[in-house]
Image: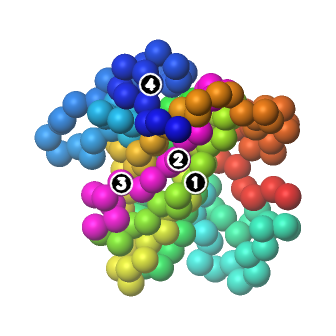
């Protein structure tokens, strides 16, 4: 496997809307990087409802466990949890595996994004899991970078892709709760 360069990302991976990257004062970086792409956070969120007292069960999630918001900035309570979505829509080639990693700007504030893979031939908007590990409220910003995607190209295409498996999170158009 090899890491895709910025030129190879432009050529092989479909990203819409594509952002060329670059530094902008006062804004968390996003877009194309040397060997990756920083996805921007969309405006729709699901915040874990602090008044809901059920059990979080990935096999049977209660939609009432979350409150839906559409905002430019989301404040996550201390030790809180939220789901967001990427602004970008991705189409991953059959010979590429993506790994989404949290950006250090947020991690240095105690805001952790779950490491998640995007398998070969996965398509959609990325559901982003965001945890505030601090006892204080923490803010995330829509339209700005939240995760870096690293693209790994295999020497040959995989034998069974996410599309072949008809993966349960294929073609996500927004935030998806857990499915089994």
At 60% from the left and 69% from the top, the residue drawn is 48
Q: Relative to 126, does residue 16 appear above or below in the rendering?
A: above
Q: Which element carries disc 4, helix, strand or loop?
A: helix
Residue 62 screen position, x and y as percent: 79, 67
Residue 21's image quarter?
Answer: top left
- The residue wearing badge 1 is 116
Report the span colored magenta: 91-108
Asked whether 96 falls inside the magenta stretch, the response is: yes
Q: Relative to 90, does residue 109 appear above or below in the rendering?
A: below
Residue closest to the far top: 11
Q: Which element carries disc 1, helix, strand or loop?
A: strand
Name the mark nearer the viewer: 3 or 2. 2
Residue 85 screen position, x and y as percent: 55, 45
- In this image, 168 relative to 175: left or right? right
How was this image coloured?
Answer: rainbow
Give the distance between the C-alpha atoms of the residues marked 3 and 2, in whole angstroms: 12 Å
At 76% from the left and 81% from the top, the residue drawn is 54
- The residue wearing badge 3 is 103
- The residue wearing badge 4 is 9
Give the distance between the C-alpha atoms of the residues marked 1 and 2, in whole angstroms: 6 Å
Tell me if residue 80 can be seen: yes
Asked if labels 4 and 1 touch by Cβ distance under 8 angstroms, the answer is no
Give the distance between the C-alpha atoms of the residues marked 2 and 4, in whole angstroms: 14 Å
Asked if labels 2 and 3 touch by Cβ distance under 8 angstroms, the answer is no
* Nearest the eye: 168 or 60: 168
* Nearest the eye: 99 or 2: 2
- The residue wearing badge 2 is 99
How busy is the neighbourhood of tag 3: few (under 14 within 10 Å), some, or many (20 plus)?
Answer: many
Q: Which element carries disc 3, helix, strand or loop?
A: loop
């Amino acid at each position: 496997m090899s890491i895709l360069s910025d030129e190879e990302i432009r050529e092989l991976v479909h990203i819409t809307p594509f952002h060329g990257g670059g530094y902008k004062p006062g804004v968390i970086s996003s877009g194309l990087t040397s060997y990756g792409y920083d996805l921007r956070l969309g405006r729709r969120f699901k915040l874990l409802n602090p008044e809901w007292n059920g059990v979080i069960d990935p096999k049977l999630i209660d939609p009432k466990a979350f409150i839906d918001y559409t905002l430019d900035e989301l404040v996550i309570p201390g030790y809180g949890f939220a789901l967001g979505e990427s602004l970008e829509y991705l189409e991953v080639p059959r010979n590429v595996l993506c790994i989404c990693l949290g950006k250090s700007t947020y991690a240095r504030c105690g805001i952790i994004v779950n490491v998640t893979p995007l398998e070969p031939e996965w398509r959609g908007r990325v559901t982003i899991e965001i945890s505030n590990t601090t006892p204080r409220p923490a803010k995330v910003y829509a339209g700005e970078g939240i995760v870096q995607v690293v693209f790994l190209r295999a020497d040959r295409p995989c034998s069974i892709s996410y599309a072949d498996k008809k993966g349960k999170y294929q073609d996500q158009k927004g935030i998806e709760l857990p499915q089994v």
